[in-house]
Image (cartoon, rainbow, N blue to C red):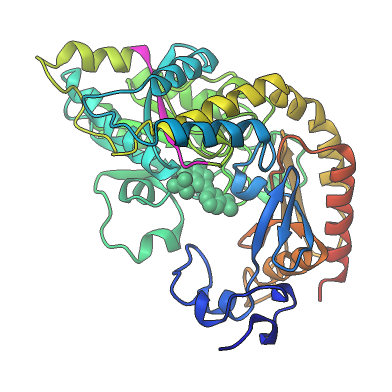
Amino acid sequence: MVAMQNLNSPMSLSSELTRADLEAFWMPFTANRQFKDNPRLFVSAKAMHYTTVDQRQVLDGTAGLWCVNAGHCHPKIVEAVQQQVATLDFAPTFQMGHPAAFQLATRLATLLPGDLNHVFFANSGSEAVDSALKIAIAYHRACGQGTRQRLIGRERGYHGVGFGGISVGGIGPNRKFFGSLLTGVDHLPHTHNLEHNAFSRGQPEWGGHLADELERIVALHDASNIAAVIVEPVAGSTGVLIPPKGYLERLRAICDRYGILLIFDEVITGFGRLGASFAADYFGVVPDMITVAKGITNGTIPMGAVFVRQQIYDAFMQSATSGIELFHGYTYSGHPVACAAALATLDVYEQEGLFQRARDLADYWEEAVHSLKGLPYVIDTRNLGLVAGIELEPIPGQPTARAFECFLRCYQRGLLIRTTGDIIALSPPLIIEKHHIDELFGLLAEVIRELP
Ligand code: PXG
């Protein structure tokens, strides 16, 4: 038995785990062999910090994976989960129900923009996205427009890992290993352009016209064949791509012109990340559906959801002759423990004014982000709400290596960042204080300066 302290890992000193103990878990989106040779393990968390297995504090610059908006182990959420699991551990929502699912949907409806007022529950962002795509196609059929089946995503879009999500998604490696995917999918061009927009503060000036590419796709296929367009209002996973001014408005206008549904995937922008309930509110552009996950339960219990407009729900209720209107759902749709977590999370967001807090801190955050301009290898800094992207010049012939080295060094120095390609993405819990922001960017600047 090889004790972890004998491995080449300064982070595993107090672990009881052996190298062999790490073998069975096939880790998601991870370089398994590399990680297991040099593991990084968290054992607890509180508010803004993780504690590592060797009892070091790590400042959370990423809210876990964009989900812990109210900070870690919030006592009110912990208590709500504990109570619920001891009271009603599970109840089916197929032809049965329990109060918390209805309460949560009603509560969410009050938070939603426009006439989005119905909620379909799933368990992850991926499931929420696949649900939304299925609802879009079935909706048009219910309206007597069953030829509208094509789906339009965007290059560099991330919509989870279901077959629907990777089909409309625009990330090469997420697609190339998995066969023919969904048919009938087109992609808008992405909007990222350093030549025009490097070091933009907030929304970039250049690129609104890229939404007009949708007109080209409509001309090619005819609107009568197109069901929906899905985009992240701010793309997260591919490196914090902020929508150019006017872009989302133009997408909305074109969708309206041709009767195409517009879906915002707000899995990372939902629940306060930009300083408003949803990106739809922040940008003042109301889509026909919104997909969420992550922050809906503060990351505590898995949950995803699709929010739909009144007219979409009505189309199903009016068209079905009788019986089940939508042949879709998950065993855990509206799981009681997830509902309890979400209700408590919404209470905390409201009582602590966290969305407003994010809005109030956004200027301070922006200054801190752009203070990195001029450091070695930094070719772009960008920000919106409490999100930042810092793009590093790749090492020639070794894309991703420089940012990953930065990630490892930050972790060793007590800071959790997230990297994608050669881009650092930051999205802290919304409870972050100014001194944490100073600490975060101070550490990051030091690490970047010391990069080989
Ligand atoms: N849509 C969007 C916009 C997302 O960001 C999903 C769907 C899928 O959610 P699930 O719950 O199925 O994972 C996501 C997930 C990162 C990172 O570092 C982002 C996500 C997941 C893991 C890492 O950017 N987003």
Q: Nearer the viewer, residue 192 or 103?
A: 103
In the rendered image, residue 306 lying in the magenta stretch gets the answer yes
Number of marks drawn? 0
Q: Is residue 349 above or below residue 188?
A: above
- x and y percentages locating residue 288 in the rendered image: 41, 21
Q: Would residue 148 be found to the left or right of residue 50 on screen?
A: left
In the rendered image, residue 442 lying in the magenta stretch gets the answer no
Which residues, given as a range, are shown in magenta?
301-310
Work out which quarter of the rendered image holds the N terminus and state it: bottom right
Q: Quadrant of residue 290?
A: top left
- x and y percentages locating residue 254 in the rendered image: 42, 23
Q: Would residue 341 be found to the left or right of residue 319 on screen?
A: right
Q: Would residue 146 be found to the left or right of residue 369 on screen?
A: left
Q: Quadrant of residue 280?
A: top right
Q: Main secondary structure of the magenta part?
A: strand
Q: Nearer the viewer, residue 78 or 386?
A: 78
Q: Is residue 7 above or below residue 14?
A: below
